[in-house]
Image: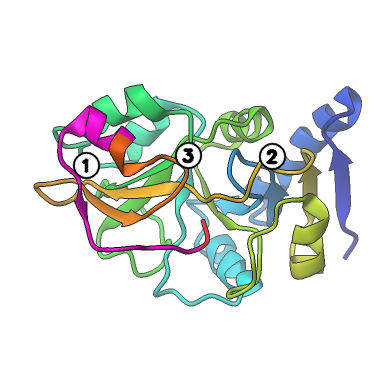
Amino acid sequence: MTIRRYDCADPDQRAAGLTDAASTVRRGELVVLPTDTVYGIGADAFTPTAVAALLEAKGRGRDMPTPVLVGTVRAANALVENLGPYGQDLIDAFWPGPLTLVCRANRSLSWDLGDTKGTVAVRMPLHPVALDLLKETGPMAVSSANRAGAPPATTAKEAEDQLGESVQVYLDGGPCADNVPSTILDLTTAVPRLLRKGAISVEKLRGVVGYVATDGDNTGGD
């Protein structure tokens, strides 16, 4: 299988790459894309075989379900049962950006992201290439572009070195500004609960929602 790479700093390659990546996702194949945190490996969220291929490429089990990236707030709203009392305020404050919100999933959706226990982790990234692709494809299952246990990729080359031919298209958006993952906040409980420390501090979150429950330090890949 031939790997296709696109330098998104070049306008022509960027346009061609986004077109190729969107059709690749629609075919149920995998792409690597830049985000505002680290590089991600992505698949169509509604194609179970594609999500299974993503988990296999990472060497990761179904017990660690894949987050979903969206290109619009409207798309996020369609994926969740509700945002709870704090979700919209958090979205207004931090999206697009490095905040992942865990909500109850819309039960009418037919998808399989892994063992989610009825929830979905959703985020709208602050990266022009990612947003342009997501607006073409709709919601994508996206996890950090690395093998399980290895450091997250901060360049397209690092992603390719780890994932190789399991991914068909690599969109190179240049090196990530830093490798801090997104903050993950659980909105399925009465009080918002921090699941992972990340790019948005607890203090900033508390500035919006008042109180955030924390369980010590939580770290991990995006």
Residue drawn at (24%, 28%) of the image: 208
Q: Horizontally, is 131 left or right of 4 in the view?
A: left
Q: Position of residue 93 (x, y in %)?
A: 35, 24
Q: Which segment is the magenta one?
A: 204-220
Q: Hey, which quadrant is residue 83 in on the image?
A: top left
Query: Would residue 58 be seen by someone viewing this image from the given angle?
Result: yes
- Label 1: which residue? 81
Residue toward you, 137 or 70: 70
Q: Which residue is mark 2?
A: 22
The location of residue 33, given as percent across then percent down, is 69, 45
Secondary structure type for disc 3 = loop
For label 2, the SS is helix
**Mark 3 vs 2, N-terminal side:** 2
Provide residue 181's location: percent of width, then percent of height.
52, 51
Q: Quadrant location of residue 165?
A: bottom right
Q: Amino acid at mark 2?
A: Ala
The quadrant in which the N terminus is found is bottom right
Residue drawn at x 62%, y 31% is 127
| Amino acid type assigned to the residue bearing label 1 in the image | Glu
What is the C-alpha distance between the residues marked 1 and 3?
22 Å
Foreground pick, 76 / 219: 219
Q: Earlier in the sequence, mark 1 or mark 3?
A: 1
Query: At x 77% / y 50%, what residue is drawn?
Result: 155
In the rendered structure, does residue 68 fall within the stretch colored magenta?
no
Instruction: Classify mark 2: residues with Cα within 10 Å, few (<14), some (14-19) or many (20+).
Output: many
Amino acid under disc 3: Pro
Q: Position of residue 84 (x, y in %)?
A: 16, 37
Taking 41 as reference, is 80 left or right? left
On screen, residue 96 versus residue 214, left or right, reads right
